[in-house]
Amino acid sequence: MTDDSVRIRPWRPEDRGLGLDLFDSNVPRFFAAQERQDFLDFVDDLPGPYFVLQDAAGQALGCGGYAAAEGDESVAVLCWGMVRADRHRAGLGTVLLTARLDRIAADPAYRSVAIETTQHSCGFFARHGFVQTRQVPDGFAPGMDLVEMTLDLGRYRRSRKG
């Protein structure tokens, strides 16, 4: 995957349908069907920057964003990151994650990044430096554990400079 074959752009309200398509492509492996309304509520009232990952032809390949944590604005929380299921394992998740982390790291107010993910995705985040802090069996839905992870931004910033 070359960086010029995809681009990240800001989410627009008219992206709601493509977001649903991306979400639906990841049910039931990465999202529970009952989370669909939570996703819609999120994109209808974004708490922070949210982006669309698209190819050179403008086709949506993924989406994801971040927001300041409630109660601790030094923590950025990754929100609803996903790649179209038929494009998994092509490096797109890394492109989307890195774009978000670079934007977060550019803001000196943030000291760390947090995510709530599942046991199906936590390995991906661990490969990018996130450390698991808690796991709740069936925390999202039956068979979908809630896995909390964090990333130290000081370490991330240093790794990007070197």
Image (cartoon, grey):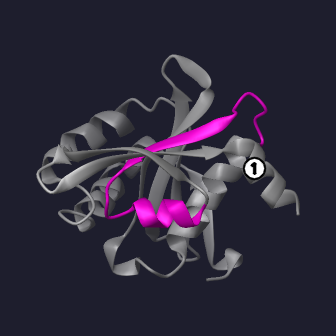
Report crowding for label 1: few under 14, some 14 to 19, many 20 or more residues within 10 A (C-alpha). few
Number of numbered labels in the structure image: 1
Residue at 33% across, 80% down: 86
SS class of the residue under badge 1? Answer: helix
Q: Quadrant of residue 62?
A: bottom left
Q: Which residues are magenta?
A: 106-128
Above or below, comparing residue 47 to residue 77 in the picture: above
- Residue drawn at x 24%, y 51% is 145
User: Picture coordinates of residue 19 (x, y %)?
Assistant: 35, 54
Residue nearest the viewer, comparing 91 with 131: 131
Residue 57 rendering spot, x and y as whole percentages: 53, 76
The answer to which quarter of the image holds residue 109 is top right
Q: Quadrant of the N terminus?
A: bottom right
Q: Is residue 119 above or below residue 140?
A: below
Residue 77 placed where, x, y %? Answer: 51, 37
Q: Is residue 129 magenta?
A: no
Instruction: Kindly identify which residue carries mark 1.
Output: 155
Residue sitting nearer the eye, 122 or 54 = 122
Q: Is residue 119 magenta?
A: yes
Residue 20, percent from left and from top: 28, 55
- Residue ID at (61%, 22%): 73
Q: Amino acid at mark 1?
A: Arg
Q: Is residue 22 left or right of residue 4?
A: left
Q: In this view, which residue lies farthest toward the right?
A: 162
The quarter in which the C terminus is drawn is bottom right
Q: Is residue 43 above or below residue 54?
A: above
Give the quadrant of residue 159.
bottom right
